[in-house]
Amino acid sequence: MIDFLHRILILCRKELLAILKDPSSRIVLIMPVFIQSFLFGYAATYDLNNAPYAVLDQSRSAVSTELIAKLESSGVFHRVANLSSEHEIAEAIDSGEALLVLQFGPSFEEDLYAGKAADLQLILDARNSNSAGSAAAYINAIVASFNQDWLRDHGGGEPAISIEARAWYNPNLETRWFFMPSMIASLAFLQTLMLTALSVAREREQGTFDQLLVTPMSPTEIMIGKAVPPIMIGLVQSTIVMLVTMHWFHVPMAGSFVTLYLGLIFFMISSVGVGLAISALSANMQQAMLYAFMLIMPLMLLSGLATPVRNMPMPIQILTYANPLRFAIDLIQRVYLEGVSILTVWHDLVPLFVIAALTLPWAAWLFRHRLV
Amino acid sequence: MREVSVGLPQRDQSQHSFRAFVRRLFALTRKEVRQLLRDKSNLSIGLLLPVILMLIFGYGLSLDVKNAPIAVVMDDSSPTAMEAIVGLRLSPFLSPVMLSSMQEAEAMMLAREVDGIVRVPSNYSRELAAGHASIQVIVHGAEASRASIILNYVTATLAQQGSRSADRRGGISEGGLGYINLELRLWFNESNTSTWYLVPGLIVLIITLAGAFLTALVMAREWERGTFEALFVSPVKPVEILLAKIIPYFCVGIIGLTMCLVTARFLFGVPMEGSLPILLFASVLYLLVALGIGLLISSVTKNQFMASQVSLLVSLLPVFMLSGFMFDLRNVPMAINIIGHLFPATHFMSLIKTLMLAGNVWPQIILECSILMAYAVLFIGLARVVTRKRLD
């Protein structure tokens, strides 16, 4: 048993040295994680912010001015142009100058006072359907609240219903709050998987893997020795992203670190398992890298990082059960934002455990049984 | 006299050297093509991954809010209260689930079976008669953008319903009150599906893959295996080596582009409002930029692991995160917007979206194409400078 541990320790040390000896690879493992967590923390936003809009006000009335003031005071929109005729709309939208144009018809105010429906046209640039959708929903809400006030002030008699809106776990509804915790898992996933995929393939290419096989170490020991260093590096990377999320972006951590790290360790083991299996299957570094990459792209896209898993069609949702990142993101979000305990998220650990239990022994078996 | 005697052999020589150039280039290109075709992993990334990505993007990803499940808790079941929430049922964006208790709703929210809760309190109709009723709306904030869209829809629907019933009641006595009717028109994407805006972005991603990621590995591999030194002693020139590396991957990129365009048009019905030749021209320019970046990374790092990491960091992740592919650059802080615009992908992204969804916007076409051209010259030029037949 002591021999076993000793051999694993030595192999781990050798692996860590091989990875960290080169100053440029030390930099490439730490710096990008820092830079990316800052950049993406700011860039990853689906929230409207200073959305540019233009107004074509043909009614030139007090009511239209009042509605525009309401829009401005929301802080979400800012006016970039006042248009004077209908054919200017196309130009404002085509050039990307305005995300939306509000058009008040000439009879806007008369209609309103005459007790008719006063039409307000909202023209949106839907090249980015997400921004367009958010803007439409915003303006919809602003118009609805305007209508309420209008009815109240003009003898609607009946008092308005007030709506108390609250958002759980993310009171200001910032995308960053949802995105940064997901990055804790995904940024580390990217490099850990690449690193592991290369570990065996590099030794195969350089011929040193055969030497390793003739040492007294068993394939299991080699497997553990190859798996532990990337897990450690992945945990360090996750910690960096987590610290940036907590202390730079001030996203409050609601749950316990023990639960979070337990989840992260399970996640790292399963992604290292996937990486080692790829590595053991590949003949050289190039193959390992490309196959790892072919997996990383779909796994990241279908993890719930970019778009919610629930929006995906059923067959694809079933496929995501083989995706360690999906469960890691779910677990981290719940622990980080909702502060749930392990009792609520244990079901996320099961698939991670299954993936690790399948890929790691398979990789160890492949060490000896795949002759290149 | 002198001019003639010198001129003739010179022309002869230049003709000869041109023929030799073509011969060497052809030989090298043939070698690269064979190397590319021999390793299945290369081809699978160049041709199979685009197909997988297209299917994922076309069918798998959706940012749209449609039929979002909402729990409705009616602590007051009077007709007045029922009237307040009737609008939720009619909304195409929401699908309400009627529940009897708040505990049940909270449990469903925790399990993420519903996106939000609408709660009508037990004293609703009494309060309404007294003049200050309220309805509680709670959304699950973890997916912020979805939550805010849902929140806005729920609020607007409830408020509209409130106004309408108030109007009806007021209307009996006072002869109707006006209200604003919002007419929504979505340009360039009438159905407002995210597929239309994701698929053009995917073309950028696939060209980057073939150009920057695959090429970054080829030169680094030759350095790592020492075969580059073997090329030193041959008569080939650095330009020829670079061209021979560019040509096969250029073809892979063009095949990927064609597949993307065909699927975008015929499988997903993404329109092609602008002109196809301009789109192809811009794509070729961007492909050259990507190839330049790949070769530059490759020649600088001289190591496959570093090359793959660097190309991942400077070419692919920016396409995802900073180019306006997923996240609208109009919403990010100024500094990030500027950083985003340093990447050539951002320019190609906005151009290709405009060309496919909006049409030919000439000022933009000219501006973005010149920027891409400048980047292509810059990166390929730099790759040429860095590639020398010399050991460091």
Image (cartoon, rainbow, N blue to C red):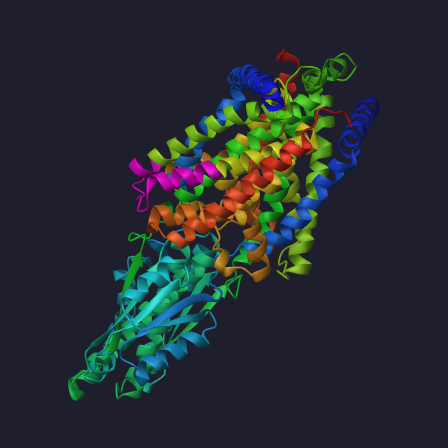
Residue shown at the point (67%, 29%) measured from the top left: B387
Residue B14 location, quadrant: top right
When the figure is inspected, residue A39 is found, relative to residue B38, above or below; the finding is: below
Residue A190 on image: x %, y %: 61, 38
Q: Which residues are magenta?
A: B263-285
Q: Is residue B272 magenta?
A: yes
Residue visible at 60% across and 59% down? Answer: B335
Q: Is residue A151 above or below residue B52?
A: below
Residue A323 position in % (x across, y down): 52, 36
Horizontal placement of B209 versus B300: left or right?
left
> Does the magenta stretch mainly form a helix, a strand or a loop?
helix
> Residue A297: within the magenta?
no
Judge by depth and name the residue closer to the eye, A273 or B300: B300
At x 46%, y 46%, the residue is B369
The answer to which quarter of the image holds residue A361 is top right
Considering only vertical position in the picture, is A136 above or below B11?
Answer: below
